[in-house]
Image (cartoon, grey):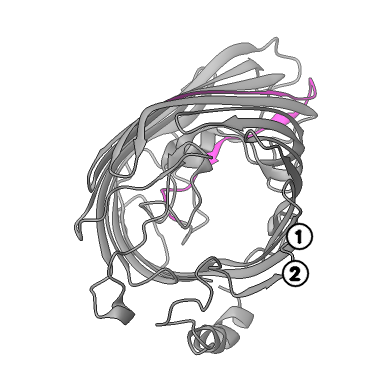
Amino acid sequence: MSLLYQRYLPYVVLGLLFLPGFSLAEPAKKNCDSLFCYSSKDDFFQFESGTRLQLDRGVFINDSRTDFDNEWNVRRARLSSSAQIGEHLSIDFTYDFARDDRSAIRNAFIRYTSANNTRFTVGHFKEPFGMERLTSVQDLAFLERSLVSLLTPPRSLGVELHKHTHHWTAAAGMFTTGTESSSNDTKFGTSARVTFAPQSDAGRIVHFGLGIAHRNTDSQQEVRFRQRPETRNTDIRLIDTRTFIADSYTYLGIESAIARGPWALQAEYIYSHVGKARINETDSGENIHFSGWHIDLTWIASGEPQPYNHEKGTFGRLRPAHSVQHGGWGAWRLGMRLSELDLTNHPITGGRQQNLTTGLTWVLNRNISLSSEYVKVLKVDGGEFTNASPAIFQSRLQIIY
């Protein structure tokens, strides 16, 4: 972590904690969870601005194949602003100060929403693909998304048409390279997702979904697939294809989830088809595939029902029934996840990794939560770190307003 963060972060945290009404008090306006809210007298114009701070600590148990360093990490330090103009038009902008490259701009879009919940979005935002990918980071049951999240499209510049009801969602869009793209930059791509939830009330959820995303690349463009071991407290990737040339790649995703009361089970499988993969420009290339999956089991020990976001077709945010400032114990959630990602298919040998993650989250109130996790790399087959099996203890302080 940079010297700047080390020097000034404690003062930022203390300042946030002692903001009037921030730490252990509910917002003055029940309909406003943000740090700053403004509304015109006729409510035609509404403006909100909020913050999101995530401070992580990672402690590694290395084996003979790894040499991770224990790290503090400002995972996210975001400032977001949104405006609602009339009943249909909205604007959103989010900037992440924890990033020092072009990916610092997270969201920057304009959206028109009709009266029948059909919306048209243009700008920079998440593409419609994957239940885990579309779940907000502040609503995830774990500190990081699973290994297979690598096989999902990033935030991108584009347009999207989205429709939702109480039981289903449908979205499709056309996109080009965004600020979150890496070496897999593309000229053009499309993404689409549909979900169906015959039961979608809090604590009683049955969810199914399908997604597809396609990317075209230049015929001589290098691409690379690599993944961290479900932690951002290191830049080391245990599985890595290195750069190779490909003409295109397509993601196909299947997702499902079920919840009964405080219990929830979620699973996803993603298959990636890579067209004309080759090591050298002179090779003819072969069509190859990568794949991965994850299974999550969570239990809200404090008894709150598992929430569901009907608009996004994802699990929603856990809000404690009895916040600490009201004399309660907040909300407690335990989770276990098994995940796998396979990046090996001749002639590419990126490796195959499997992880087991267990975690505990304490949500004190709607603004503050504490999380702790144990991530065990069960195995790595192939690649530079073959047979590696390190473990990671990581924790997070999250402040949202």
The x, y position of residue 67, in whole percent, is: 40, 59
Residue 128 highlighted magenta (yes or no): no
Q: Residues within 10 Å of mark 1 (few under 14, many from 20)?
A: few
- Judging by the rendered image, the residue that carries numbered circle 1 is 44
Q: Find disc 2 in the rendering and name its residue.
A: 40
The single residue placed furthest to the front in the displayed view is 42
Q: Is residue 230 magenta?
A: yes
Q: Nearer the viewer, residue 87 or 175?
A: 87
**Left or right: 259 as drawn, with respect to 283:** left
Q: Which residues are magenta?
A: 207-231
- Which residue is at 36% across, 52% downward? 141
Q: Is residue 271 above or below residue 333?
A: above
**Front residue (pair 306, 87):** 87
Q: Amino acid at mark 1?
A: Phe
Is label 2 in a helix, a strand or a loop?
loop
Above or below — where is 184 with respect to 315? above
Asked whether the beta carbons under mark 1 and mark 2 sit within 8 Å of each other, the answer is yes
Q: Which quadrant of the view contains residue 84?
A: bottom right
In-front residue for pair 176/123? 123
Residue that appears at 55% across and 82% down: 9
Residue 319 percent across, percent down from the top left: 36, 61
Q: Amino acid at mark 2?
A: Ser
Instruction: Where is residue 128? Give x, y as percent.
Output: 60, 33
Q: Is residue 97 visible?
A: no
